[in-house]
């Protein structure tokens, strides 16, 4: 397992910050978590919870972040002169199943202030946009009504029940399971309402995109960053054609703006196109193939870039409209 994953930058919302957990947070976290009312809702934590165990847990979490298998954040309230620690939130990955398991807790005096739901929303949308997962799973004890309400408020859907051992309670506890899918926070990919499709023609959006293929036969994909519609999905660099712009001029402009490469029109070969109905618009998108450009592509708009070979292509979740391109491109790259 590689040990060189970069720690994520702090995530902010309102006057709160989620910052990757550090050993220096231990004393404040311990005074909040070593409380029966907090611990009884957490399956893996004994009571009383010694500072030594918490220190060990924090060390493990820091190592897991370096290994890229989990991301744990301390939640700070920045409305005080010196930011105050109010709780913790984290996600552990199971990339084989494209799944992340999320968990959170707050010190009792910070309950009932919407902090948990805002932190959960923030971490969920960051995780789906940046990690190799498509689903987030959460578990709540059936008597943890506050947590169940938080999960539902953030779009998590109940999908079953079970029993789990809670260390502090020393008994099996009935629990409910919840799942968040990318579609639950990506309105652009929501199902098309039947009556709406039939009655009202959708706006046609003309977008151009490029399949950039390098001399090793690798294809460049870009990942839509958090904050954009359909964040976390992979696409071909490109963008909307502006009024009075030719598709080729638009693509040359977008490639410069998005990934800082210079392409000349003669290097853009029309390849195929997508005509795809999204929930709120109809996408018409010519795809050009390009083998020659100047400069090394670099992300200028906060997106991730990946050079992908033929065998790896199926592992990337591409935009719905782009799915028909994949077999055609594989033939070209092979
Ligand atoms: N660039 C690009 N856009 C794509 C692809 N597939 C696909 O469905 N699209 C959609 C996503 C966007 O709705 C639109 C692209 O417009 P854009 O790139 O100028 O817009 P944007 O990312 O700023 O997105 P938005 O917030 O307006 O959705 O086309 C693709 O492979 N490349």
Image (cartoon, helix red, strand yellow):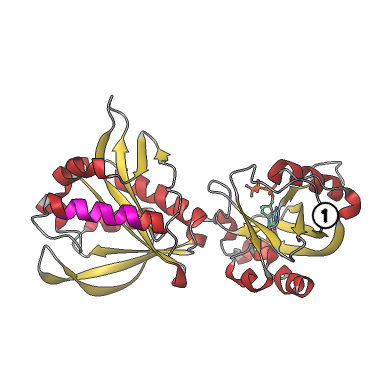
The C terminus sits in image quarter: bottom right
Main SS, magenta region, reads helix
In this view, the residue in front, 7 or 244, is: 7
Residue at 60%, 48% (x, y): give it. 303
Residue 112 counted in the magenta span: no
Position of 127 with respect to 310 (left or right) is: left
Residue 56 counted in the magenta span: yes
Residue at 21%, 72% (x, y): give it. 164
**In the image, farthest residue toward the top:** 81
Residue 108, located in which quarter of the rendered image?
Answer: top left
Residue at 8%, 55% (x, y): give it. 48
- Residue at which label 1 appears: 292
Q: Which residues are magenta?
A: 53-63
In this view, the residue in front, 310 or 88, is: 310
**In the image, farthest residue toward the right:** 266
Q: Is residue 321 visible?
A: yes
Residue at 75%, 45% (x, y): give it. 295
Query: Residue 102 location in percent, x, y?
Result: 34, 59
Query: Residue 226 location in percent, x, y?
Result: 53, 48
The N terminus sits in image quarter: bottom left
Query: Residue 33 location in percent, x, y?
Result: 17, 49
Residue 174, located in which quarter of the rendered image?
Answer: bottom left
In what element is the residue under mark 1? loop
Residue 41, located in which quarter of the rendered image?
Answer: bottom left
The image shows a total of numbered marks equal to: 1
Q: Is residue 201 visible?
A: no
């Amino acid at each position: 397992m590689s040990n060189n994953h970069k720690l994520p930058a702090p995530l902010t919302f309102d006057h709160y910050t989620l910052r990757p957990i550090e050993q220096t947070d231990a004393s404040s976290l311990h005074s909040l978590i070593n409380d029966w009312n907090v611990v009884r809702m957490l399956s893996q934590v004994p009571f009383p919870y010694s500072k030594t165990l918490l220190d060990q847990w924090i060390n493990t979490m820091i190592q897991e972040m370096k290994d890229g298998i989990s991301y744990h954040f301390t939640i700070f309230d920045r409305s005080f002169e010196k930011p105050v620690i109010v709780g913790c939130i984290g996600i552990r990955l199971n990339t084989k199943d494209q799944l992340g398991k999320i968990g959170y807790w707050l010190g009792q005096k910070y309950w009932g202030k919407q902090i948990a739901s805002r932190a959960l929303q923030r971490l969920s949308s960051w995780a789906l946009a940046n990690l190799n997962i498509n689903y987030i799973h959460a578990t709540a004890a059936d008597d943890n009504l506050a947590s169940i309400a938080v999960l539902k408020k953030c779009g998590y859907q109940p999908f079953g029940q079970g029993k789990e051992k809670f260390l502090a309670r020393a008994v099996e506890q009935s629990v409910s399971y919840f799942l968040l899918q990318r579609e639950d926070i990506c309105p652009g990919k929501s199902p098309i309402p039947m009556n709406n499709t039939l009655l009202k023609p959708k706006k046609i959006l003309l977008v151009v995109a490029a399949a950039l293929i390098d001399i090793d036969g690798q294809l460049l994909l870009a990942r839509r960053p958090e904050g954009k519609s359909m964040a976390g999905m992979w696409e071909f660099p490109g963008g909307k054609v502006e009024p009075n712009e030719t598709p080729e001029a638009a693509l040359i402009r977008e490639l410069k703006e998005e990934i800082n490469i210079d392409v000349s029109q003669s290097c853009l070969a029309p390849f195929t196109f997508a005509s795809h109905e999204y929930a709120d618009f109809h996408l018409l998108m010519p795809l050009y193939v390009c083998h020659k450009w100047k400069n090394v592509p670099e992300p200028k708009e906060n997106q991730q870039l990946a050079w992908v070979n033929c065998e790896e292509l199926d592992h990337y979740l591409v935009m719905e409209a782009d799915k028909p391109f994949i077999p055609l491109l594989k033939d070209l790259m092979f």
